[in-house]
Image (cartoon, grey):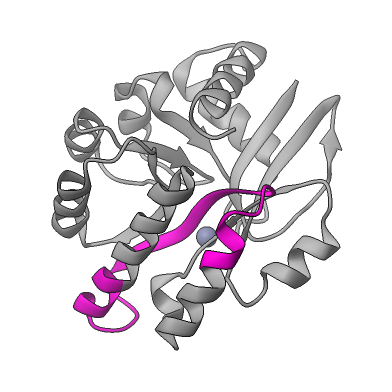
Amino acid sequence: MYLYNIHTHNIGSREIEGYKFRYILNTFPDDFEKKSSENEDVWFSCGIHPWYIDDISRQISLLEEIASDERVVAIGEAGLDKMKGPDINIQIDVFRQQIELAVKVGKPLIIHCVKAWDELVALHKEYKTDIPWIIHGYRGNAQQAAQLGKIGFKFSFGEHFNEETLRSLPIESIFCETDTSEVTICKVYSSISDVLHIEINQFVEKIEYNIKKYIK
Ligand SMILES: [Zn+2]
């Protein structure tokens, strides 16, 4: 039985207390080659983070080469951030290209979104894709989550989250992650299963089901 960490920037232990971990290590087009050669037993996501948009056509063409690699199970993190990064219209343009690429290779999107929910929802409605759109590090309130969930978004929860939101969502729409935090994925699973009042092994099975259904 694996505990899946669907979004992390660091690989820690492979195993704790009898639980094995399966990581999706986040990479950027420029560090994918290095990170993928150093970590042979993990999965990867690769995307152009809105903070690091730079030479767009070069980043996109590199990402296009990487996206079909079988070790890459998701495109991202990619998305929109109104607090940091270039002008929102540039971010939208780069995100669009990544949505289209994810659709082309048939892989889920791992999304970074800060204060750009209207724009994100508009893109989701416009593209009407079959691929999962997973918002990572989700900390929004239950009302917002209900609106996003209703149109099909999935959510990944890390060290900090809104407990009411978590309890309000169907378990089929959630994933777990550590992102840049120092906590282990074991700790995230145990705090989420505590909030949901689900026995940890049962929770592990539910998340594994989601992984197989939506990611790989
Ligand atoms: Zn991240």
Q: Nearer the viewer, residue 101 or 38?
A: 101
* Magenta-drawn stretch contains 70: yes
Residue 166 image-quadrant placement:
top left
**Place of residue 168 in the rendered image (x, y in percent of width and height, measured from the top left):** 29, 23
* Magenta-drawn stretch contains 83: yes
- Quadrant containing the C terminus is top right
- Residue 85 versus residue 121 in the image, above or below: below
**Place of residue 157 in the rendered image (x, y in percent of width and height, measured from the top left):** 47, 40
User: What residue lies at 73% left-to-right and 27% top-to-bottom?
Assistant: 2
- Residue 202 versus residue 97 in the image, above or below: above
**Place of residue 37 in the rendered image (x, y in percent of width and height, measured from the top left):** 82, 64
Q: Nearer the viewer, residue 85 or 138?
A: 85
User: What residue lies at 69% left-to-right and 34% top-to-bottom?
Assistant: 186
Q: Which residues are magenta?
A: 64-93
Q: Is residue 137 visible?
A: no
- Residue 163 versus residue 6 in the image, above or below: above
User: What residue lies at 55% left-to-right and 17% top-to-bottom?
Assistant: 206
- Quadrant containing the N terminus is top right
Q: Is residue 129 left or right of 199 when viewed as pictured?
A: left
User: What residue lies at 16% left-to-right and 35% top-to-bottom?
Assistant: 147
